[in-house]
Image (spheres, rainbow, N blue to C red):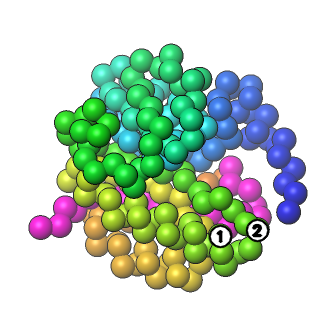
């Protein structure tokens, strides 16, 4: 399906010097749910191309730290940002925060990851859900007690069912389809606030 890619948000991202239009999704989520604040330590799972890192770096300020992980080569456009570190790694190979040069868990985990899409709806939904499940599995490695999560999901019956089973991991658990999401897209975002660490 061909999208008219050069839409309003695409042009706005270019004008505002952001690496991708997806910046506006995170901005809307953060304004509505207040997921991050000055001084936070944030990890972005699957950060490429890096617009979420750009937003995060600005929001957390110089006293914060944003760490991005992606299997794609490092996006050098992010290197000048002083409060950002990026790694070319598979996030599911990261066993501890020490693998990222960090001694402590993060205040916020964000992920705009999507699978390589095939155009076959059911396959793409399954692949997306597989990524989402893996992120929830590794949350204990990355996320502090009472921390926040933002993650992209491709909507499906299986995804809704799985997310229902994860609700209890957070004090507050919400869904949002940001305004900048293309109307044909089946993606939405899960916002978890107040991570409950299981004993």
- Work out whether residue 127 can be spotted: yes
In contact (CB < 8 Å): disc 1 and disc 2: yes
The residue shown at (44%, 53%) is 150
> Is residue 188 found inside the magenta-colored segment of the image?
yes
Q: Quadrant of residue 99?
A: top left
- The numbered mark, 1 or 2, whose residue comes first in the sequence reads 2
Q: Residues within 10 Å of mark 1 (few under 14, many from 20)?
A: some
Range of magenta residues: 180-199
Q: Taking 80 as reference, is 105 left or right? A: left
Residue 109 placement (x, y as % from top left): 38, 48
Q: Which mark is residue 124?
A: 1
- Check disc 2 and report the residue beneath it: 119
Left or right: 99, with 135 as reference point: left
10 Å neighbourhood of mark 2: few (<14), some, or many (≥20)? few
- Is 192 magenta? The answer is yes
Q: With respect to residue 17, does 102 lie above or below?
A: below
Q: Position of residue 143 (x, y in %)?
A: 28, 51
**Dot 2: what SS?**
loop
Give me the residue at 83% from left, 46% from top: 5
Q: Residue at x 84, y 54 (%)?
A: 3
Q: Which residue sits furthest left?
A: 199
Residue 174 point in image, percent of width and height: 44, 64
Side of 151 relative to 101 (left or right): right
Residue 175 in sight from this viewpoint? no
Q: Secondary structure at mark 1?
A: helix
Q: Alpha-carbon distance for marks 1 and 2? A: 7 Å
């Amino acid at each position: 399906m061909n999208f008219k890619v050069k839409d309003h948000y695409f042009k706005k991202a270019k004008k505002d010097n952001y690496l991708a239009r997806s910046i506006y999704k995170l901005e809307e989520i953060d304004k509505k749910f207040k997921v991050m604040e000055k001084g936070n330590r944030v990890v972005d799972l699957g950060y490429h191309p890096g617009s979420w890192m750009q937003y995060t770096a600005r929001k957390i300020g110089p006293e914060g730290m944003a760490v991005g992980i992606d299997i794609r080569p490092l996006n050098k456009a992010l290197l000048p940002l002083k409060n950002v570190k990026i790694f070319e790694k598979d996030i599911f190979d990261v066993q501890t925060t020490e693998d990222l040069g960090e001694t402590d868990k993060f205040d916020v985990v964000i992920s705009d990851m999507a699978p390589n899409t095939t155009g076959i709806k059911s396959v793409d939904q399954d692949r997306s859900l597989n990524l989402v499940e893996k992120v929830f599995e590794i949350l204990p490695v990355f996320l502090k007690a009472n921390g926040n999560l933002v993650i992209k999901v491709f909507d499906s019956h299986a995804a809704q069912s799985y997310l229902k089973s994860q609700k209890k991991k957070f004090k507050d658990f919400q869904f949002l389809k940001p305004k900048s999401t293309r109307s044909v897209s089946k993606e939405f975002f899960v916002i978890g606030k107040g991570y409950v660490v299981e004993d």
